[in-house]
Amino acid sequence: MFLNQLYNHRKTLSFRLTLWYALIFTLTSLLALSIFYYRISRITMENTDDELMEEFYEFAGIMDHEGRGELMAEFELEILEEAEESVFFRLISPDGEILKSSDMKDFSGVTVSVDALAALQNNKEYVIETISLPGHEYSVQAIYGTISPDIIFNMGMSLEDNYEYLSTFRNLIFMLMIPLFFIAAFIGWFLARHALKGVEEVTQTAIEISKGAIDKRVEVKRRLFEIDRLANTFNGMLDRIQSLIKGMREMNDNVAHDLRSPLTRIRGIAEMTLMGKESIEDYNEMAASTIEECDKLIEIINTMMDITETEAGVSPFKSEKLDIVELILSACELFDPIAKEKEVQLVTVLPDRLFLQGDKSKLQRLITNLLENAIKYNRHGGTVTISVNTDNHHVNIRVEDTGLGIAEEELSHIFERFYRCDRSRSLAGIGLGLSLAKAIAKAFNGDIRVQSVLDQGSSFQVILPA
Ligand code: ADP
């Protein structure tokens, strides 16, 4: 049952993190304990060597201070005292003859080391050797030391105690590894759960949203930085999706409402012409009106698409170096005939050049929309002034006219789709130009502001980051 659950969880991130944490923790602990074990084994061996050297110096001291007779007596005594211990003592002549020896029955096979005697001949004070005895489980540590020109002290100790002590220590380390692995796994599991709790909450929210709770958001609780960042990004994405859905709904409503009128008009014209059975001129007129209404429909659909794409950021937004002054001058040139027809004077207050980074055709569209409105909603003989100025952070494009002006209560609505002020309904237009201009300004990370006084004129200010 437990194993089944474990198997099912094998591909989860928390399982992997737990496993990795447990493995790394256990292996690191094993490495640290191994280094510790190595140090302990070295110290144990050094202690044995120290013990051997201590005995050697003791006998050398007796020989120096009290003479050969006392040395032999002390040697006999030592043999008796240490009879029960796993040690042996021998006195050897420089050519290897054993002068005196303790009972060697536990150390059968220990011969006199020719190498050690040779080293002593070469003026070495003492030599320590580790001897492995065939048939014996444990090695022997032995010292050879010159205590007088004709006597060499030789003592050996079985390393059995050392080995047993170290083997107990080794077993303890391996036994420790098992609980250590499980403790590490538990800590790893706890940490992974804690870290992934936020991810789980994001997933839960996503599940609830997919079931229809579109207003649901992940709570940002000042947890781990990455998790809060994920929650914030996820919430931001949801806000964006929600506003796109809202935009699409609005567009559906607008399309349903505003496309119906031209279509109804087309149908009405066709119906009247058919019922009247009029002349060829009437049919021509019907065709002309139909084309006009169709053009309006196409313009509405295209502008709606442009607004939606610009707002959603799906239409490619180029980043090119553009000269605003050049752009404004060519827009003025384009609208000059219309302005002349209405006797509107176009005035420009521009620097020589002013460069900006962005999408040229989109900014062109923004400026022409404002310029077209300033001429269209102007009075005969009026003026339109386009000026540009810049500070370190912003570029301000101002389009001012001396026309109809906009009533205060209508100012907040003019950027809405299809909104047209009462006094301008008689003039041609579809009410989408300013919505598109605003969407473009936002795409530039800028904005449009308006000030207006009825019957005196309006001033539209486009603020773009420099
Ligand atoms: P359209 O001009 O096609 O009607 P717009 O979105 O460009 O659509 O403008 C929306 C409305 O804002 C216009 O119908 C008009 O009533 C008002 N408006 C825009 N520009 C001006 C202006 N310069 N002067 C007076 N009214 C304006």
Image (cartoon, rainbow, N blue to C red):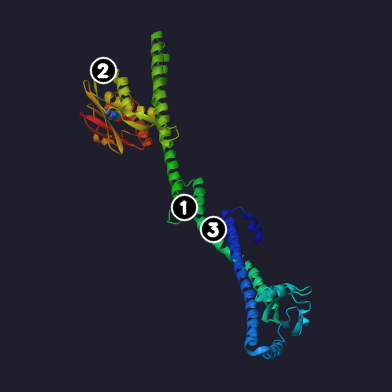
Nearest the viewer among 441 and 127 is 127
- Give the spatial CA distance, label 1 vs label 2: 61 Å
Q: Vertically, is 111 above or below 274? A: below
Q: Is residue 397 left or right of residue 303?
A: left
> Which amino acid lies under the numbered mark 3 shown in the image of this protein?
Ala
- Asked which quadrant contains residue 266, the reply is top left
Helix, strand or loop at label 2? It is helix
Nearer-the-camera pick, 419 or 82: 82
Which residue is under mark 2? 340
The spot of residue 202 in percent (x, y) is 49, 51
Which residue type carries mark 1?
A: Glu
Marks 1 and 3, how far apart at CA: 14 Å
Question: Measured from the top left, where is residue 176 in percent x and y?
Answer: 62, 69
Q: Which quadrant contains ligand 1?
A: top left
Q: Residues within 10 Å of mark 1 (few under 14, many from 20)?
A: few
Residue 226, which numbered label? 1
Identity, as a three-letter code, of the amino acid under mark 2: Lys
Residue 186 on image: x %, y %: 57, 64
State yes or no: discs 1 and 2 in contact (Cβ < 8 Å).
no
Residue drawn at (62%, 75%), measured in percent from left and top? 46
Earlier in the chain: of badge 3 and badge 2, it is 3
